[in-house]
Image (cartoon, rainbow, N blue to C red):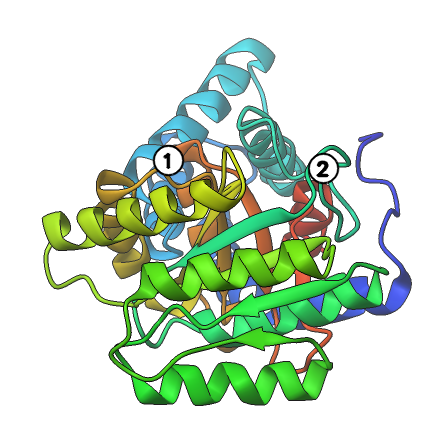
Amino acid sequence: MSFFKKIFSSDKKENLDKGLEKTKNSFFSKLTKAVAGKSKVDDEVLDNLEEILVSSDVGVETTLKIISRIEERVSKDKYLGTSELNEILREEIASLLSETNSGEATEFSIPKDKKPYVLMVVGVNGVGKTTTIGKLAYQFKKAGYSVVLGAGDTFRAAAIDQLQIWADRVGVPIVKQQMGSDPASVAFDTLQSAVAQNADIVIIDTAGRLHNKVGLMNELSKVKKVMQKVVEDTPNDVLLVLDGSTGQNAFEQAKQFTAATEVSCLAVTKLDGTAKGGVVIGISDQFQIPVKYIGVGEGIEDLQVFNKYEFVDSFFK
């Protein structure tokens, strides 16, 4: 297909291929067993395929969509060989991801008319939220932007220290207060500082607690209101970080957070350590929220801009 063109640099693509290896191997070993001894795609093959997609954490709803599309093609083409199944699956998954109208980017960039561009980052503890912020700061700085970090997760001492370590490592300024400080106050100071420095990008960390939806909602809306006193219409994006290795639990977190606050984009981390990479396809489809970044390794370069064509290409390589 024409859209499977080489658009990433070879080292980036290599990292992506390597990061999705466990998912791919698990998926294809199951697929090989499912079509063993079969020459054409029949009901039994489709039933087996449905089971494989669900067990790869693509999610039930998204799996049913994919199966229904393949059934249409089977009835239209009358005869489909199992040898063609890979290509059909690849096309249908790419087509499904295309419907979310995202995943076209290849570079770390921000809207030209937003300065500073303000990104608020949400997610439960342990999903790789602070690490994602650090790696984002690194990638944006590398792309030539000036970045300011705000340590708004004031409920966990380690969160402030961890973000400070990343700020030092990347060489970007950080605004922080004592543990237990008001997160909205940190956000306010961070934006003021960024405006004074004429910074391009502000990344605000927030408390990673899902203690209850109302508490979370109130806290995040307070942080937003206070930021808008400094820069109108901020934050420009709310990024939800999800741990891809938790599979269905990532769906649950996405459900909770999207109910508590307006989430505009997603980062799915830890895809290299799991066979559950199909979760990217399901979450992107079900929540209709663009997956913007994926984590495919522990290295500082291993946070990538999500590109659906490259993702599907690596998945089916």
Q: Is residue 14 left or right of residue 290?
A: right
Q: Give coordinates of residue 202: x percent, y percent.
A: 60, 57
- Which residue is rendered at x = 67% and y = 58% of the image? 196
Q: Residue at x 66, y 36 (%)?
A: 84
Q: Which residue is mark 2?
A: 111
Instruction: Estimate how packed mark 2 is, as few (under 14), some (14 to 19) or many (20 or more) residues with alpha carbons within 10 Å.
Output: few
- Residue 231 at what x, y percent from top left? 54, 41
Number of marks in picture: 2
Closest to the observer: 37 or 7?
A: 7
Residue holding disc 1: 287
Q: Can residue 20 be seen here?
A: no
Q: Quadrant of residue 81?
A: top right
Along the line of sight, which residue is nearer the eye, 250 or 221? 221
In contact (CB < 8 Å): disc 2 and disc 1:
no
Closer to viewer: mark 2 or mark 1? 2
Q: Quadrant of the N terminus?
A: top right
Placement of 246 over or under 5, stated as above or below: below
Q: Few, some or many C-alpha atoms within 10 Å of disc 1 (few <14, some 14-19, many ≥20)? A: some
Q: Is residue 69 above or below residue 113?
A: above
First of labels 2, 1 by sequence position? 2
Q: Secondary structure at mark 2?
A: loop
- The picture places residue 193, in percent across and down from the top left corner, at 60, 63
Q: Would residue 205 be visible to someone looking at this image?
A: yes
* Residue 203 vertical position relative to residue 22 in the rendered view, above or below: above
Q: Position of residue 182 (x, y in %)?
A: 28, 67
Q: Amino acid at mark 1?
A: Phe
Q: Nearer the viewer, residue 126 or 207?
A: 207
Secondary structure at badge 1 equals helix
Residue type at mark 2: give it.
Answer: Pro
Which residue occupies 64% across, 72% down? 135
Q: CA distance from mark 2 to mark 1?
A: 23 Å
